[in-house]
Image: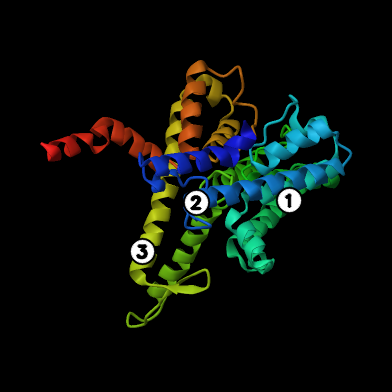
Protein backbone atom coordinates (compact mmCIF):
# COMPACT_ATOMS: atom_id res chain seq x y z
CA UNK A 1 0.00 0.00 0.00
CA UNK A 2 2.77 2.41 0.90
CA UNK A 3 4.78 1.61 -2.23
CA UNK A 4 1.74 2.21 -4.44
CA UNK A 5 0.88 5.35 -2.51
CA UNK A 6 4.36 6.75 -3.03
CA UNK A 7 3.83 7.27 -6.73
CA UNK A 8 1.07 5.15 -8.17
CA UNK A 9 -2.07 6.82 -6.86
CA UNK A 10 -1.17 10.20 -8.32
CA UNK A 11 0.04 8.67 -11.60
CA UNK A 12 -3.23 6.71 -11.83
CA UNK A 13 -5.38 9.70 -10.93
CA UNK A 14 -3.49 11.95 -13.33
CA UNK A 15 -3.97 9.52 -16.20
CA UNK A 16 -7.62 8.59 -15.61
CA UNK A 17 -8.85 12.01 -14.53
CA UNK A 18 -7.14 13.91 -17.34
CA UNK A 19 -8.22 11.48 -20.05
CA UNK A 20 -11.79 11.50 -18.78
CA UNK A 21 -11.88 15.30 -18.81
CA UNK A 22 -13.33 15.39 -15.31
CA UNK A 23 -10.57 17.51 -13.81
CA UNK A 24 -7.59 19.46 -14.96
CA UNK A 25 -4.11 18.07 -14.74
CA UNK A 26 -2.94 20.93 -12.53
CA UNK A 27 -4.95 19.66 -9.56
CA UNK A 28 -2.94 16.45 -9.36
CA UNK A 29 0.71 17.49 -9.47
CA UNK A 30 1.52 17.00 -5.80
CA UNK A 31 3.63 13.90 -6.40
CA UNK A 32 5.02 14.79 -9.81
CA UNK A 33 5.61 18.44 -8.95
CA UNK A 34 4.08 19.42 -12.28
CA UNK A 35 7.25 18.36 -14.09
CA UNK A 36 6.28 16.16 -16.99
CA UNK A 37 8.88 13.95 -18.62
CA UNK A 38 6.98 13.68 -21.89
CA UNK A 39 4.03 15.45 -23.55
CA UNK A 40 1.70 12.49 -23.12
CA UNK A 41 0.20 11.86 -19.69
CA UNK A 42 0.20 8.09 -20.26
CA UNK A 43 3.81 8.11 -21.46
CA UNK A 44 4.81 10.14 -18.39
CA UNK A 45 3.05 7.73 -16.02
CA UNK A 46 4.62 4.73 -17.78
CA UNK A 47 8.13 6.20 -17.49
CA UNK A 48 7.53 7.03 -13.82
CA UNK A 49 6.54 3.45 -13.08
CA UNK A 50 9.54 1.99 -14.93
CA UNK A 51 11.94 4.21 -13.00
CA UNK A 52 10.15 3.40 -9.74
CA UNK A 53 10.36 -0.36 -10.33
CA UNK A 54 14.08 -0.25 -11.21
CA UNK A 55 14.88 1.83 -8.12
CA UNK A 56 12.90 -0.59 -5.92
CA UNK A 57 14.66 -3.66 -7.33
CA UNK A 58 18.06 -2.00 -6.84
CA UNK A 59 17.12 -1.16 -3.25
CA UNK A 60 16.14 -4.77 -2.52
CA UNK A 61 19.45 -6.08 -3.86
CA UNK A 62 21.51 -3.57 -1.87
CA UNK A 63 19.62 -4.28 1.37
CA UNK A 64 20.18 -8.02 0.93
CA UNK A 65 23.93 -7.35 1.01
CA UNK A 66 23.62 -6.18 4.63
CA UNK A 67 22.53 -9.65 5.77
CA UNK A 68 18.81 -8.92 6.00
CA UNK A 69 16.46 -11.69 4.82
CA UNK A 70 14.50 -11.45 1.56
CA UNK A 71 11.11 -10.80 3.19
CA UNK A 72 12.46 -7.95 5.29
CA UNK A 73 14.52 -6.59 2.39
CA UNK A 74 11.44 -6.37 0.16
CA UNK A 75 9.40 -4.58 2.83
CA UNK A 76 12.21 -2.16 3.65
CA UNK A 77 12.80 -1.38 -0.02
CA UNK A 78 9.10 -0.81 -0.73
CA UNK A 79 8.83 1.65 2.17
CA UNK A 80 12.26 3.21 1.70
CA UNK A 81 12.03 4.15 -1.97
CA UNK A 82 8.46 5.35 -1.40
CA UNK A 83 9.81 7.59 1.40
CA UNK A 84 7.06 6.21 3.62
CA UNK A 85 9.04 4.71 6.47
CA UNK A 86 6.54 2.20 7.85
CA UNK A 87 7.90 -1.04 9.28
CA UNK A 88 6.54 -4.52 9.91
CA UNK A 89 8.16 -4.43 13.37
CA UNK A 90 6.95 -2.40 16.35
CA UNK A 91 10.48 -1.19 17.07
CA UNK A 92 11.07 -0.18 13.44
CA UNK A 93 14.62 -0.11 12.13
CA UNK A 94 15.94 -0.60 15.67
CA UNK A 95 14.62 -4.18 15.47
CA UNK A 96 17.53 -5.17 13.22
CA UNK A 97 20.37 -3.56 15.21
CA UNK A 98 22.26 -3.47 11.91
CA UNK A 99 24.55 -0.49 11.36
CA UNK A 100 25.24 -1.47 7.73
CA UNK A 101 21.50 -1.59 7.00
CA UNK A 102 20.99 1.89 8.43
CA UNK A 103 23.81 3.34 6.35
CA UNK A 104 22.47 1.63 3.20
CA UNK A 105 18.96 2.97 3.82
CA UNK A 106 20.20 6.59 3.80
CA UNK A 107 20.98 6.70 0.04
CA UNK A 108 17.84 4.63 -0.66
CA UNK A 109 15.68 7.20 1.16
CA UNK A 110 17.39 10.08 -0.61
CA UNK A 111 16.97 8.28 -3.96
CA UNK A 112 13.20 8.37 -3.42
CA UNK A 113 13.33 12.08 -2.59
CA UNK A 114 15.27 13.00 -5.74
CA UNK A 115 13.29 14.46 -8.70
CA UNK A 116 12.33 11.58 -10.96
CA UNK A 117 13.01 13.89 -13.87
CA UNK A 118 16.74 13.33 -13.24
CA UNK A 119 16.40 9.57 -13.58
CA UNK A 120 14.55 9.92 -16.84
CA UNK A 121 17.05 12.39 -18.29
CA UNK A 122 19.93 10.14 -17.25
CA UNK A 123 18.28 7.20 -19.01
CA UNK A 124 17.28 9.18 -22.10
CA UNK A 125 20.69 10.84 -22.56
CA UNK A 126 22.70 7.83 -21.36
CA UNK A 127 24.69 10.19 -19.13
CA UNK A 128 24.88 10.95 -15.42
CA UNK A 129 25.86 14.57 -16.04
CA UNK A 130 22.33 15.70 -15.21
CA UNK A 131 22.78 14.46 -11.64
CA UNK A 132 25.96 16.43 -11.11
CA UNK A 133 24.45 19.55 -12.66
CA UNK A 134 21.17 19.54 -10.73
CA UNK A 135 21.17 22.24 -8.07
CA UNK A 136 18.24 20.77 -6.16
CA UNK A 137 20.14 17.52 -5.66
CA UNK A 138 23.19 19.43 -4.45
CA UNK A 139 20.96 21.42 -2.10
CA UNK A 140 19.65 18.14 -0.65
CA UNK A 141 23.16 16.78 -0.18
CA UNK A 142 24.35 19.98 1.50
CA UNK A 143 21.27 20.05 3.74
CA UNK A 144 21.89 16.42 4.73
CA UNK A 145 25.55 17.14 5.51
CA UNK A 146 24.61 20.23 7.54
CA UNK A 147 21.89 18.52 9.59
CA UNK A 148 24.11 15.47 10.20
CA UNK A 149 27.02 17.59 11.41
CA UNK A 150 24.88 19.71 13.74
CA UNK A 151 23.16 16.68 15.25
CA UNK A 152 26.37 14.70 15.81
CA UNK A 153 28.12 17.68 17.41
CA UNK A 154 25.12 18.64 19.56
CA UNK A 155 24.42 15.09 20.73
CA UNK A 156 28.07 14.54 21.60
CA UNK A 157 28.94 17.85 23.27
CA UNK A 158 25.65 19.07 24.75
CA UNK A 159 23.95 15.77 25.55
CA UNK A 160 26.92 13.56 26.40
CA UNK A 161 26.02 10.75 23.99
CA UNK A 162 29.04 8.63 22.91
CA UNK A 163 30.44 9.68 19.54
CA UNK A 164 29.70 6.34 17.83
CA UNK A 165 26.05 6.42 18.94
CA UNK A 166 25.70 10.12 18.10
CA UNK A 167 27.14 9.49 14.63
CA UNK A 168 24.81 6.55 14.03
CA UNK A 169 21.65 8.29 15.23
CA UNK A 170 22.49 11.75 13.87
CA UNK A 171 23.40 10.56 10.39
CA UNK A 172 20.39 8.29 10.02
CA UNK A 173 17.85 10.73 11.42
CA UNK A 174 19.24 13.48 9.17
CA UNK A 175 18.65 11.20 6.18
CA UNK A 176 15.13 10.36 7.26
CA UNK A 177 14.32 14.07 7.81
CA UNK A 178 15.75 15.41 4.55
CA UNK A 179 14.11 12.65 2.49
CA UNK A 180 10.76 12.88 4.33
CA UNK A 181 10.84 9.13 4.98
CA UNK A 182 10.21 8.55 8.67
CA UNK A 183 12.42 5.55 9.38
CA UNK A 184 13.67 5.87 12.95
CA UNK A 185 16.63 4.22 14.71
CA UNK A 186 16.26 6.00 18.05
CA UNK A 187 13.59 6.79 20.64
CA UNK A 188 15.33 10.13 21.32
CA UNK A 189 16.46 8.91 24.73
CA UNK A 190 19.19 11.30 25.83
CA UNK A 191 18.35 13.86 23.14
CA UNK A 192 17.81 17.37 24.42
CA UNK A 193 15.05 19.74 23.34
CA UNK A 194 17.32 21.65 20.95
CA UNK A 195 18.28 18.76 18.60
CA UNK A 196 14.70 17.46 18.59
CA UNK A 197 13.27 20.85 17.53
CA UNK A 198 16.16 21.37 15.08
CA UNK A 199 15.37 18.05 13.40
CA UNK A 200 11.65 18.86 13.41
CA UNK A 201 12.25 22.06 11.41
CA UNK A 202 14.01 20.13 8.66
CA UNK A 203 11.23 17.53 8.64
CA UNK A 204 8.96 20.29 7.37
CA UNK A 205 11.25 20.90 4.41
CA UNK A 206 10.96 17.42 2.88
CA UNK A 207 12.47 16.28 -0.41
CA UNK A 208 12.34 17.62 -3.95
CA UNK A 209 9.40 18.33 -6.22
CA UNK A 210 8.73 15.54 -8.67
CA UNK A 211 9.65 12.85 -6.12
CA UNK A 212 7.75 10.63 -3.69
CA UNK A 213 8.74 12.87 -0.77
CA UNK A 214 6.36 15.09 1.15
CA UNK A 215 6.91 18.38 2.95
CA UNK A 216 7.26 21.94 1.72
CA UNK A 217 9.90 20.78 -0.80
CA UNK A 218 13.48 21.90 -0.90
CA UNK A 219 12.91 23.56 -4.29
CA UNK A 220 10.66 26.19 -2.72
CA UNK A 221 13.04 26.77 0.17
CA UNK A 222 15.81 27.29 -2.37
CA UNK A 223 13.71 29.74 -4.37
CA UNK A 224 13.05 31.79 -1.24
CA UNK A 225 16.78 31.83 -0.51
CA UNK A 226 17.53 33.07 -4.03
CA UNK A 227 14.81 35.68 -3.62
CA UNK A 228 16.28 37.00 -0.38
CA UNK A 229 19.65 37.43 -2.11
CA UNK A 230 17.92 39.20 -5.02
CA UNK A 231 15.99 41.56 -2.75
CA UNK A 232 19.10 42.30 -0.71
CA UNK A 233 21.10 43.21 -3.84
CA UNK A 234 18.27 45.49 -5.03
CA UNK A 235 18.18 47.23 -1.64
CA UNK A 236 21.96 47.72 -1.36
CA UNK A 237 22.86 48.68 -4.93
CA UNK A 238 22.00 51.94 -6.66
CA UNK A 239 18.28 52.44 -7.48
CA UNK A 240 19.31 52.78 -11.13
CA UNK A 241 21.05 49.43 -11.18
CA UNK A 242 19.29 46.56 -12.94
CA UNK A 243 19.46 43.43 -10.78
CA UNK A 244 18.27 40.20 -12.34
CA UNK A 245 17.14 37.25 -10.28
CA UNK A 246 18.88 34.03 -11.25
CA UNK A 247 17.30 30.59 -10.94
CA UNK A 248 19.10 27.39 -11.98
CA UNK A 249 21.90 29.56 -13.28
CA UNK A 250 19.64 31.49 -15.65
CA UNK A 251 18.34 35.03 -15.47
CA UNK A 252 14.61 35.31 -14.77
CA UNK A 253 12.46 38.25 -15.85
CA UNK A 254 11.17 40.35 -12.98
CA UNK A 255 7.53 39.53 -13.73
CA UNK A 256 8.32 35.81 -13.86
CA UNK A 257 10.46 36.07 -10.72
CA UNK A 258 7.64 37.69 -8.76
CA UNK A 259 5.19 35.00 -9.91
CA UNK A 260 7.66 32.27 -8.97
CA UNK A 261 8.24 33.80 -5.56
CA UNK A 262 4.56 34.46 -4.84
CA UNK A 263 3.58 30.84 -5.55
CA UNK A 264 6.39 29.45 -3.40
CA UNK A 265 5.68 31.92 -0.59
CA UNK A 266 1.96 31.12 -0.68
CA UNK A 267 2.58 27.40 -0.22
CA UNK A 268 5.17 27.94 2.52
CA UNK A 269 2.73 30.20 4.38
CA UNK A 270 -0.03 27.60 3.99
CA UNK A 271 2.21 24.95 5.55
CA UNK A 272 3.20 27.24 8.42
CA UNK A 273 -0.43 28.20 9.07
CA UNK A 274 -1.43 24.52 9.06
CA UNK A 275 1.37 23.79 11.53
CA UNK A 276 0.50 26.74 13.80
CA UNK A 277 -3.23 26.02 13.74
CA UNK A 278 -2.73 22.36 14.62
CA UNK A 279 -0.37 23.20 17.49
CA UNK A 280 -2.77 25.78 18.92
CA UNK A 281 -5.55 23.19 19.01
CA UNK A 282 -3.46 20.34 20.43
CA UNK A 283 -1.57 22.33 23.07
CA UNK A 284 -4.88 23.19 24.76
CA UNK A 285 -5.07 19.49 25.65
CA UNK A 286 -3.27 18.42 28.88
CA UNK A 287 -1.99 15.28 27.10
CA UNK A 288 -0.04 17.27 24.49
CA UNK A 289 0.81 20.15 26.83
CA UNK A 290 2.69 17.70 29.06
CA UNK A 291 5.46 17.50 26.44
CA UNK A 292 5.54 20.64 24.30
CA UNK A 293 8.80 19.83 22.50
CA UNK A 294 7.62 16.31 21.66
CA UNK A 295 4.28 17.65 20.42
CA UNK A 296 5.95 20.26 18.19
CA UNK A 297 8.25 17.58 16.76
CA UNK A 298 5.41 15.16 16.05
CA UNK A 299 3.21 17.82 14.44
CA UNK A 300 6.15 18.91 12.26
CA UNK A 301 6.47 15.25 11.30
CA UNK A 302 2.77 15.11 10.34
CA UNK A 303 2.79 18.35 8.34
CA UNK A 304 6.03 17.30 6.63
CA UNK A 305 4.57 13.83 5.94
CA UNK A 306 7.54 12.26 7.66
CA UNK A 307 6.36 9.81 10.30
CA UNK A 308 9.17 9.85 12.84
CA UNK A 309 7.80 10.41 16.34
CA UNK A 310 8.92 11.59 19.75
CA UNK A 311 6.16 9.45 21.26
CA UNK A 312 3.29 11.94 21.55
CA UNK A 313 1.41 10.69 18.51
CA UNK A 314 0.45 7.17 19.49
CA UNK A 315 -2.51 4.89 20.06
CA UNK A 316 -3.19 6.39 23.48
CA UNK A 317 -3.64 9.99 22.34
CA UNK A 318 -7.19 11.47 22.43
CA UNK A 319 -9.53 10.30 19.68
CA UNK A 320 -10.29 13.78 18.33
CA UNK A 321 -6.56 14.33 17.72
CA UNK A 322 -6.40 11.20 15.56
CA UNK A 323 -9.09 12.62 13.27
CA UNK A 324 -7.48 16.06 13.25
CA UNK A 325 -4.01 14.74 12.42
CA UNK A 326 -5.40 12.45 9.72
CA UNK A 327 -6.86 15.52 8.01
CA UNK A 328 -3.62 17.45 8.53
CA UNK A 329 -1.47 14.70 6.99
CA UNK A 330 -3.84 14.28 4.06
CA UNK A 331 -4.03 18.00 3.33
CA UNK A 332 -0.27 18.46 3.67
CA UNK A 333 0.44 15.52 1.34
CA UNK A 334 -1.73 17.11 -1.35
CA UNK A 335 0.08 20.41 -0.73
CA UNK A 336 -2.97 22.14 0.78
CA UNK A 337 -3.98 24.22 -2.29
CA UNK A 338 -5.75 21.30 -4.08
CA UNK A 339 -7.63 20.58 -0.84
CA UNK A 340 -8.74 24.21 -0.63
CA UNK A 341 -9.86 24.03 -4.27
CA UNK A 342 -11.74 20.80 -3.52
CA UNK A 343 -13.68 22.27 -0.60
CA UNK A 344 -14.31 25.51 -2.47
CA UNK A 345 -15.61 23.45 -5.38
CA UNK A 346 -17.93 21.51 -3.07
CA UNK A 347 -19.30 24.76 -1.67
CA UNK A 348 -19.67 26.41 -5.09
CA UNK A 349 -20.72 23.28 -6.95
CA UNK A 350 -17.58 23.07 -9.16
CA UNK A 351 -19.01 25.70 -11.48
CA UNK A 352 -21.93 23.54 -12.62
CA UNK A 353 -24.39 26.26 -11.66
CA UNK A 354 -22.78 28.79 -13.99
CA UNK A 355 -22.59 26.17 -16.75
CA UNK A 356 -26.30 25.35 -16.50
CA UNK A 357 -27.17 29.05 -16.43
CA UNK A 358 -25.16 29.52 -19.59
CA UNK A 359 -27.15 26.80 -21.35
CA UNK A 360 -30.40 28.37 -20.27
Which of pointers 2 and 3 lies earlier in the amino acid sequence? 2
Please state the horizontal and vertical placement of residue 317, each as a whole percent of the image: 57, 19
Q: Which residue is mark 3?
A: 258
Please state the horizontal and vertical placement of residue 335, each as a whole percent of the image: 45, 43
Which of pointers 2 and 1 lies earlier in the amino acid sequence? 2
Q: Nearer the viewer, mark 2 or mark 3?
A: 2
Secondary structure beneath label 3: helix
Secondary structure beneath label 1: helix
C-alpha separation, residue under disc 2 versus residue under disc 3: 19 Å
Please state the horizontal and vertical placement of residue 17, each as a whole percent of the image: 42, 40
- The structure's colour scheme is rainbow
Q: Quadrant of residue 192?
A: top right
Left or right of 316 on screen, residue 63: right
Residue at x-position 68% and y-position 51%? 111
Badge 2 crowding class, 10 Å Cα cut-off, few under 14, some 14 to 19, many 20 or more, is some
Locate the N terminus by quadrant: top right
Q: Which mark is residue 33?
A: 2
Q: Nearer the viewer, residue 257 or 11?
A: 11
Q: Which residue is mark 1?
A: 107
Q: Nearer the viewer, residue 147 or 156?
A: 147
Secondary structure beneath label 2: loop
Left or right of 39 on screen, residue 189: right
Q: Are marks 2 and 3 in contact (CB under 8 Å)?
A: no
Residue at x-position 57% and y-position 53%? 208
C-alpha separation, residue under disc 2 versus residue under disc 1: 21 Å
286 versus 11 height, above or below: above
Please state the horizontal and vertical placement of residue 328, each as a whole percent of the image: 47, 32
For this orientation, the residue located farthest to the left is 360
283 versus 320 height, above or below: below
Amino acid sequence: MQWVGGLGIVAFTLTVATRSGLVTRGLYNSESGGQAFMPSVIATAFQMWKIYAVLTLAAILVILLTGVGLWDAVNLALCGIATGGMSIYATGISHFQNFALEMVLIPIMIAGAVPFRLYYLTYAKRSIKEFFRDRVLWAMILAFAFVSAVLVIDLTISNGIPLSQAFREGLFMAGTAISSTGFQNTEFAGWGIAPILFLGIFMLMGGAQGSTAGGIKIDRIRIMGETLVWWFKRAVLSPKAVVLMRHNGKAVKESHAEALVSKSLLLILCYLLLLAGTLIILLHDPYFASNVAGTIFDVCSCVGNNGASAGMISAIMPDYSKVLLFIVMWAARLEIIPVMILFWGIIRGFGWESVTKGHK
